[in-house]
Amino acid sequence: MLPVADTYDALVAAFEWRIPQQYNIGIDVCDKWADGSGRLALICETRDGQATHYTFDELKSLSDQFAHALRASGVQKGDRVGIFLAQSLETALAHIAVYKCGAIAVPLFALFGPDALEYRLADSGAVALVTDMSGAQKIASVRPRLPELRSVFCVDIEQADRELQLDSFWSALNAAPLHFDAEPTQADDPAVIIYTSGTTGKPKGALHAHRVLLGHLPGVEMPQAFFPNDAKLMWTPADWAWIGGLFDVLLPSWHHGIAVLARRFEKFDGEAAFDLMQRHGVTHAILPPTALKMMRTVVDPERWQLSLRAVASGGESLGAELIGWGRRALGVTINEFYGQTECNVVVASCATLFEPRFGSIGKVVPGHRVAIVDDTGHTLPRGEPGNIAIQAPDPVIFLGYWRNEDATRAKFRGDWLLTGDMGLMDEDGFIRFVGRDDDVITSAGYRIGPAPIEDCLLRHPAVRMAAVVGAPDAQRTEIVTAFVVLNPGYQASDELVQTLQQHVKTHLAAHEYPRTIHFVDALPMTATGKIIRRELRDRVTPPR
């Protein structure tokens, strides 16, 4: 969607949305490329390194067959279908087939347990589920409490298991006709429910229309160096159940006819990630901050010969340390992007157009109207902190929270969608992420964001990972408190606490140093790799 431009201002001026009235994600990402040419669509690599290649022609026939299988099981337009699988061929086929049926996909993170599954399947009212035997075993205990769930398709059984009430995904698919007439959906018809991480209360189901893929395109193309320029293969270690894995990688790549690599590590390994990208010639990648921080600990990353043209990252602010490391180790400037489940990829960096400004997450992606507003929805002057907000209508904004009108209304102030994140916009249009509205630390009259302190701590050779929260304090309201995971070879000690405190005082600000530091083995993370600061705050907040 992005036009050719030499400057950011020219890009914004030349951009215009092209959203057709009738639009179906499944047809767009698959059928339009299935022209008999054998165009590569997907490479699936197993944990032992075996790779299988699939073309768009194959994806079309297989997804058509599974769409027939869904119809035969009773799935109709508007019904919800859970997809509880890691990156795989079957995950992709299920998504395409659901969209072709006019049904609503409900992606579910592969590591969810029974309670998380029950909540999402019950809340969405899913009538069918696509999973593997491991997933089927997880839902076995909760299935009696899911009366709407009529069909469970299991991808790794050869025949239906009536005792376990499981249908065979592949048997049902192979028994179906080869051609399916896709539902003629409108761009505004619902297509997918993606549940929020649940960092601030129970997860809510963000309902998106088919147009959400088109709404994502400028925000994918900008931080990916005008994707699909020079693109041959896209990869992310992030689960496709995350909006970033699904709508920033898999589906936009296929919109452009670019192949995707499916390989999600059971436990992320930095060396394995370098090796994977070298072996397959990955040209474009989205690497979450947590993955980058783990890759940063790999010794001598220059030994791998990478083919990367662009790398993007979002979810947590990176900071100068990781940006500098990326230039040395990956050979590219990592472009940050910003968004959330309800309204994704609306701010981004683009080293092709402008140098990143450390401490910022980039500029507004063309086509979106992003501003800093107060709690009533009024725009604030440049340089003044407030709520990061996106103005509706916008093709990437969600339709609303599933069956939760009150929460939907609370998300808006007039026509401004409030992200729940605090930030400020400088005179040049760069937006700096300060933190979630519940992450900002108020200490001795100062409002302190955790991201700069975490970045500063990461620059110290002893620190592998860091998270910062506010702890209650009678005198200062809150004090800055850090949780630190150490690199091998370093031991927790009072001396190291003082060293790290002085490091922050010297390199960042005297009033922002962590007055308390806790050394921990690991940080609590959401399913999408974001730090759960709420849990850390609970550790330092005395019980009432």
Image: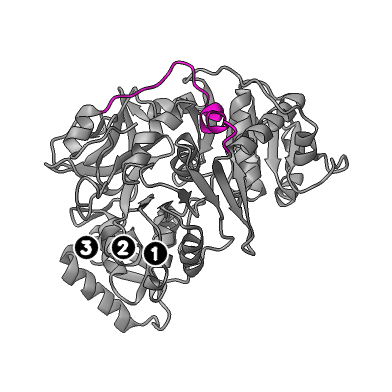
Please tell me which residue is depicted at 32% across the width and 55% down the height of the picture: 334
Distance from disc 1 to disc 2, alpha carbons, whole Å, reads 7 Å
Mark 1 touches mark 2? (CB < 8 Å): yes
Q: Amino acid at mark 1?
A: Lys
**Tag 1 residue:** 293
In magenta, the rendered stretch is 15-37
Assign a secondary structure to mark 1: helix
**Tag 3 residue:** 512
* Left or right of 145 in this view: 477: left
Distance from disc 2 to disc 3, alpha carbons, whole Å, reads 20 Å
Q: Which residue is situated farthest in the front direction here?
A: 37
The kind of secondary structure the magenta stretch mainly shows is loop
Label 3 or label 1, whichever comes before in sequence order:
1
Please tell me which residue is depicted at 34% across the width and 22% down the height of the picture: 393
Q: Of residues 407 and 263, which is closer to you in this image?
A: 263
Q: Residues within 10 Å of mark 2 (few under 14, many from 20)?
A: many
Residue 152 in the image: state x and y as whole percent.
74, 38
**Tag 2 residue:** 322
